[in-house]
Amino acid sequence: MKPKVAFYWCASCGGCEEAVVDLGEELLTVADAVDIVFWPVAMDFKTSDVEALADGELAAAFVNGAIRTSEEEEMVRLLRRKAQVVVAFGACAWLGGIPGLANLYGRRSILDYVYGEEPSLEEHDGARPQEETDVAEGHVSLPTFDDDVRTLDQVIEVDYFLPGCPPPGELIRTAITALIEGTLPEKGSVLAPDVALCSDCPRLPSKPEKPSVKRFVRPHQVQIDPDLCLLAQGLICLGPATRSGCGAVCIAANMPCTGCMGPVSRVVDHGAKAMSAMASLLEADDEAEADALIGEIADPVGTFYRYSLPASLLHRRREPEAAGRSPS
Ligand code: SF4
Ligand code: SF4
């Protein structure tokens, strides 16, 4: 009997599902080695198909996306019960990811903006989605929109974490092979090398021993030297604070690392680590100069916590009931 596996998506963009499809012909090899019994984005399975499985009957469930609704929570609890191994697939499931930036706002603010303030071709009529509604055709239920975005392991026990936004094909292949061959590492492992990206970066030889930054710049503001370490050019590259395993593809495209592979195992808070790495480079003579340099960093939360706000020590911005939307 082939091992049964499930793929599921929660609050995600679909990129992680795309990454599985991008395995191309190798997907056929995977499909040959395992029995895919649940994959809503690709095949017409129903929740009842999962419910009908015995507890632990799934060899593995790969879950991408963060947790934002009651439906997602119910599904991952169900998959946890049915699976021997649960893999948090991608940055959103592991750390909260891009959808986790919604934790800068409260539930009420988000609904007010989307259904009341957002520029629209149609007049806003003040309507809000209701969880329970009676219509002519019958009764309609919607999932609860939670107050915050949570990581998968803030909701269920997770066995492995596959980093990346989305995870690189090579890491996906290695993880699936290890699952099939029974060679997965210790539970709780992140399935990627436990070293910082700089150690794999082709520009490492040009990284100054002690880089110092007089001015932070953004990629569109400068002509980027394709061979020189990006930090040495004043660009905020999170390579020193981010796990390797991506093949440094962004660096090869002349773009600084934005941190999607998450932290190495010794780091508790990826954003704080990244901030501290950048702060140590500042070449300022006094506090006022340091403040001015820091002031040049556009969108500090989006820069340092782009993929990890829900997993961070901060987790979310607490919004007083009467406060406006601005997170600043
Ligand atoms: S990790 Fe990236 S690619 Fe995957 S669902 Fe989240 S945003 Fe999309
Ligand atoms: S800081 Fe960025 S560009 Fe420089 S060596 Fe590290 S990963 Fe490469």
Image: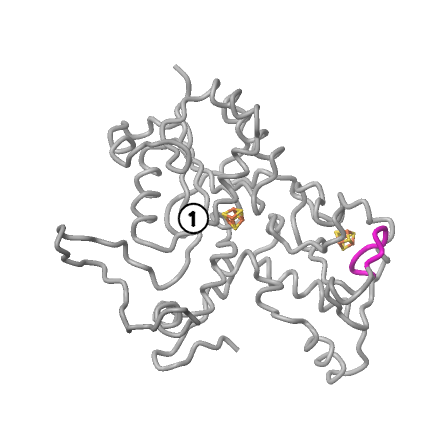
* Front-most of residues 293 and 142: 142
- At 45% from the left and 49% from the top, the residue drawn is 12
Total marks in image: 1
Q: How is the image coloured?
A: one colour
Q: Give the residue at the far top of this rendering.
A: 1
Q: Give the residue at the far bottom of this rendering.
A: 288
Residue 223 visible in the snapshot: yes
The three-letter code of the residue at mark 1 reads Asp
Q: Give the residue at the far front of this rendering.
A: 121
Q: Quadrant of residue 299?
A: bottom right
**Residue 230 image position (x, y, % from top left):** 79, 57
**Residue 182 image position (x, y, % from top left):** 50, 23
**Residue 273 image position (x, y, % from top left):** 64, 60
Is residue 129 shown above or below 151?
below
Picture quarter with the N terminus = top left
- At 80% from the left and 69% from the top, the residue drawn is 213
- At 73% from the left and 85% from the top, the residue drawn is 288
55 left or right of 280 in image: left
Is residue 147 shown above or below 4?
below
Q: Are there few (<14), some (14-19), or many (20+) residues within 10 Å of tag 1?
A: many
Magenta span of residues: 224-232
Residue 181 visible in the snapshot: no
Overall secondary structure of the magenta section = loop
242 left or right of 74 in image: right
- Which residue carries the number 1 mark? 153
Disc 1 is placed on an element classified as helix
On whether ligand 1 comes within 8 Å of the CB at mark 1, the answer is no
Quick check: is 115 in the magenta stretch? no
**Residue 179 image position (x, y, % from top left):** 50, 26
Q: Quadrant of residue 148?
A: bottom left
